[in-house]
Amino acid sequence: MTEMVKADIKKELEKAAQYVKNTGMRVLVCSGTGCVANGAFDIYDQFLKHDTDVMFKKEKKVSSIKTGCRGFCEQGVFVAVPDLDLVYVKVKPEDVPEIIEKTLQNGEIIERLLYEDPVTGQKIQKENDINFYKNQTKAALANCGNIDPESIDEYVATGGYEALDHVIKNYTPEQVCKEVEDSGLRGRGGGGFPTGKKWNFVRINEADQKYVICNADEGDPGAFMDCGIMEGDPHKLLEGMAIAAYGTGSDFGYIYVRAEYPLAVKRLRIAIEEATKRGFLGESIFGSDFSFKIKIKEGAGAFVCGEETALIASIEGDRGMPMPKPPFPANEGLFGKPTLINNVETFANVALIIKKGADWFKGFGTETSKGTKTFALTGEVNNTGLIEVPLGTKLKEIVYDIGGGIRNNKKFKAVQIGGPSGGCLTEEHLDLPLDYESLKSVGAMVGSGGLVVMNEDTCIVEVARFFLQFTQNESCGKCIPCREGTKQMLHILEKVVAGKAELKDIETLTELAEVVRLGSLCGLGKTAPNPVLSTLKYFKDEYMAHIAENRCPAGVCEAFKLIKINPDKCIGCTKCAKVCPVNAIDGKVKEKHVINQEKCIKCGACLTSCPVNAITEGN
Amino acid sequence: MVAEAKKNQEKIFEKHRKFCKVNEIVEKYKYEKQNLIAILQEVQTEYRYLPEEIMTYIATMMDISPAAVYGVATFYSQFSLDPKGKYEIKVCDGTACHVRGSMPVYNAIREKVGLQEGKFTTDDLQFTVETVRCLGACALAPVVVINGKVYSKMTADAVKIIVDELLKRSENDN
Amino acid sequence: MSNTMESKVEQKLQVDSREITFTDEKNLLEVIRKAGIEVPTFCYRPNLSTYGACRMCVVEIDGMGVQTSCTVKPQAGMKVSVNTEKTRKIRKMTVELLLAAHDRDCTICAKSENCDLQSLAKKLGVRDVRFPSKYGPGEHHVDIDNDNPSVVRDPGKCILCGACVRVCREIQGTECLSFVNRGSDAEVMPAYNKGLDEVDCTYCGQCTAVCPTGALRIKSDVEKVWNRIMDPKKKVVVQIAPAVRVAAGEAFGLPLGTNTLGLITASLRKIGFDAVFDTSFSADLTIMEEGTELIERLKTGENLPLFTSCCPAWVRFLEQRHPEFLKNLSSCKSPQQMFGSVAKKVLIEEFNVNKPEEEQIKKEDIVIVSIMPCTAKKAECGKEEFITDGQQDVDFVLTTQELIRMINEAGVDFKHIEPEHLDSPFAIFTGAGVIFGSTGGVAEAALRTAYEIITGKKIENVAITEARGLNTVKELTINIDGQDVKVAIVNTLSQASALLERVKKGEAEYHMVEIMACPGGCLGGAGQPPSYKDREIKEKRMKGLYDSDVNNPLHKSHDNPEIIRLYDKWLEKPSSHIAHELLHTHYKNRKRILGEIINLSSAAEGEKVTDVQVCVGNNCLAKGSYGAIDALTKLIKENGLENNVNIRATFCMEACSKGPSVVIDEEHIDGVTPEKIKAIFKEKILSKYAKS
């Protein structure tokens, strides 16, 4: 009789610790999507080429390691050497030999590659001294950027899979659900539904088959937090899902990843394979009778599949059209079976809650919103990237302390939060704590966590139009308010930015927004009017300027642009009049020329024809 | 000579090779309806689009209705029912890219490769230019992806240089 | 019986402050409607899955906010408001939005006054559409599908309620229609926007029956029939199908299920038809032939179960999707077609008996029109099998709805007209022929006759209650002369599919199976006035038919004296040579989808190039045609013939039973299994090139 080798977490941990110890001096090359685009793989290859040399000369083991995203993508490619408490930014492949020679062999610091504080101009060596990092609290993202996501040992060495081992050996499924509920963790995908409660709904349903689905269809434009976790710490997600499966009584899971994340898919596949090999996934996990398998399903480009029921339809191989709820997936989900659906970040918090306890988790956040939350900070802010802060952190702290303020000393105008389902926050909200309730009270939502900062040069009506165009494009077309309503809303907004709207259009727009919000079938439609409603609320004057005053205060909308000839500069060469396709320019030779604004189609042909730069475009 | 004949044979039977591949793909996914999207994805990798007769064939193999396959193929933006160009240029139009000017970049590329309004692929099937949903590289906005390679912090001028390079390459190929 | 009694617990909830009792209604909408309060909807259909898309049935529920009543389960104590500021706004705006995207040529639309969108716009007081219209005056959708005999698809009128998609998938299992594209580009269409005649649509027309607007509608032949009536040279003869008589009255305010045969007969004469007959007569004839066929098959045990062939949608379904069962199909023509054949052969001669030559009707001047509850009959009458000497046996088919239109158009006061009798000959029909209009009727009629003929004993109580009722599947066993004859009765094609599957797997064994495509049989046909909203409509129609049987002194087809006379004078006996010629038909496999051929090689074109097509339709593929392609390609490569042979894969060559099929330079070769391919290659291809 042969006995199956059962995974033993203690032995695994020892083995993993040894593995990490053997890596010697670790050179971490950030290899998130952003840094890869900036040549991270080339840099890694450069290091790889040089490793052996270093080892022989100095009899010191140095290992370069590809990690997930360190968050500060703006400054990529990041190269960190924890042993020296050092981080280099904007590293190029050609810098590698110098780094090896000076820094790795001789401990010398290369000033040029250090981060420079944009305000003080000071060079900073330690990551935690950089404002962007100093003001963050990392939990879900703690491993991202510090471990090799393609090596299971690196994850195990951080205590990975201990939580899973612990619940299987010591907890009943009911206790697991309770612990998660006690922690106050709420869904990180947008709705903010209490996670433990959701698990319990699935747990109490008796069925021959239950499913756990990870919603990794992070579709909000301007959000890439889940991408960061999957690329940087895939095992944390898998462990969270396995704990959820144990807690709900499921033995099969799906990860539905959007197809735009090929690197995440690749790393998840590796992670699943390795975890299965080690016996952390698959049959009889840790020698128990608990089994759990995970399959990856790649999306095919449909934002609406982020909606639970549409996602289920898509996994089943159908058009991703949402179904009315009830029935909820917890009762009738995938293939008609009870199904738990959480997003990536939600699952990524689970192992930590089990390990450190619900009380530890509750230590972060506000009364109703516990824990930390990741955000994708982008737009017109100095420091863009992936961040994690306790829920309830003030908007101000994010924009100014972490984000380093507005680029090019422009004026802060607004922050768009929660993508196409979210709303705008303005100056008056800078002191608003970012949590589920306060955001909802001002007409926005946490959503998945995209934060797009806008400055005075951003036309808010154009932004509303952009979001509506997005939802209109992504509407599945099933229910009438969303299919036809968003189309007509978009039409009105297009009229506004084209200078063709009338006052009564705003009335119709508001009425439409209300019907789409109340009447739509799924979350996509219900939240689609948010960007319009919230901008109408806080920037009504900007809408009015477009309609009543015929101008775009931010100077963005083409329709209001004027092309003028500066009479002081014009030399009367007639070149501009000749190139004008609509004969909108009058003037005789050697006399000042004038543009007839009614005829002008703003094609800009005259701009380039003028030899003395007398023609300019402006508002 | 033998090598050349072999090459010629391969060329003649290229369509047969793809057809065999379709059979392999459907078989690999066990003819299961739930794998339809994955099947279409892999088949599209072979053909660079989804030909009608191949969709019907897939439906026949899987014993589902061609209407259902067509419904799925037209729902997801990843699927193309028209042949795509050799160079697929994707301009990210996520919020961050949009705010930082992805549209001027997009228009510059279209102009450069000579696309008429309403078209996304050039008549010579060399270039397909499309906007795509957020690629998750927001900090590098605006982002352009050409056949899988990511170009960050694009401007209209910068992208023109890149496209020029491609135009030259495509001319040489022909 | 006791079963339904016990489980129904009465509970209460409030709708608009009124207390309402409910038991096991599946949703709030049903509860509200039952209380007599109208909730508008476009997409809810009681017998289809709940789709929840139109958002018209919104209500406000205390503690739950705005909800669609079709998706909420009723709960005791719920407080529901149907008309609130919010729900009114949603409904009105929804209709306004739909109208903006709708082809609004309402005055000339075939569904005018029967259109849910039109009536709700009126009811809700939508008087203005503030949004730009997708269609200007006189503008229509570019893709109106008008190329098949039964159904017109007009996407400009579609509101995407999905009822057609659901009925086609859930009730018929045919899945010819699907949602395509997404967002505001979404449409409903067959695969690749093909015409319905290019895909495997059975023309059952149920999609038109559930369509709330004019997006899917019955193709009208009214104008053509008027033209024939107005032509003095033509003798226009009309037959009325059994199910028509119990539905036509609905349009004129008569009680549900009223038998209006006399009124219809009188109206048709007023309209100008020259002679009026009843398809129930030829239904009796069908029983004589089909009964004989059943007796024969019971005796030999061959080709069992016997499938009925009255329903053209079912026949087309089988021809396209299950060629392996074609041998089971009764070779009898349907009653409509039997009437057509008999009319053009026999009736015409009986008309002409003892008439001077100038008064005699010429064959080309007789026009046979059918009034049918069915849209598939329109396609059936045009099948090549039913064309004799270049003339269709039945020239035109009008649905019950078109009959109603003609009656209205002619200004006939249907309700108050004096009922009239049918024309002679063939004026006599039995109750057995009339019950053809209901699911189970054909089986019951056939069993009555088969039993008496086999046993020689008279049946006193003719009613076979197990065969009756609206259930989609019924089974019964009748002992005839010591043999247990097992019968299944099925309506809807999804159930038919399931039954075929069971038969195939050997899980079920029957001697006879009656199959009708429409829910409830012909009485629920798509040509009838709409009946999907209320089960009671179908129940009453059914009762009307069985009452007609009770009131008829004759209950067995073989007792019909006109039938007996017909055989004596013209047809000898059932299944005689002449009966076969006139009353039987044959079936063939039909392609499921028209479309492109898959090129597998790209050899040069030219005279010397051999063209090889291998069928990869469902049947051939299952029989290994892919292996044949593989083997063939290898052989071509091995023999260096890649520039001489073009190989292609094609869909269905309509020879499924003999597959896998291959066509080599227009020569059709059957049974081309991978094992046989080598020999065929040698003989048909290699030999050609070896010579030169």
Image: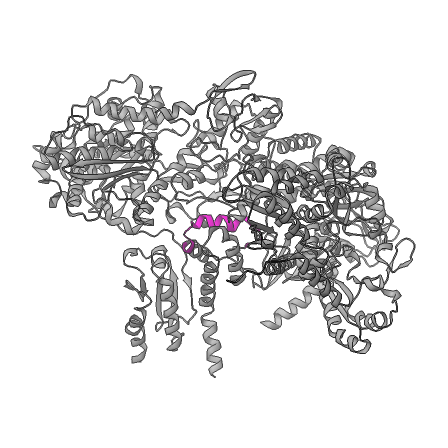
Q: Overall secondary structure of the magenta stretch? A: helix
Name the foreground residue: A316 vs A345.
Answer: A345
Name the foreground residue: A501 vs C217.
Answer: C217
| Badge count | 0
Residue A382 falls within the magenta-colored stretch: no
**In this rendering, position of residue A73 left or right of residue A319:** right
Q: How is the image coloured?
A: one colour
Residue A236: x %, y % from top left: 68, 53
User: Looking at the image, can residue C215 be seen?
Assistant: yes
**In this rendering, position of residue C516 left or right of residue C139:** left
Q: Quadrant of residue A612?
A: bottom right
Magenta stretch bounds? B60-79
- Farthest front residue? A1
Residue A152: x %, y % from top left: 67, 60
**In this rendering, position of residue C275 left or right of residue A532:** left
Name the foreground residue: C644 vs C33.
Answer: C33
Residue A533: x %, y % from top left: 71, 34
**In this rendering, position of residue C233 left or right of residue A561:** left
Q: In the rendered image of this protein, does residue A524 appear above or below residue C504?
A: above
Say which quadrant the C terminus of chain C sits in: bottom left
Residue found 73% across the figure and 62% down from its top: A17
Residue B74 falls within the magenta-colored stretch: yes
Name the foreground residue: C336 vs B23.
Answer: B23
User: Looking at the image, can residue B135 be seen?
Assistant: no
Residue B44: x %, y % from top left: 53, 59
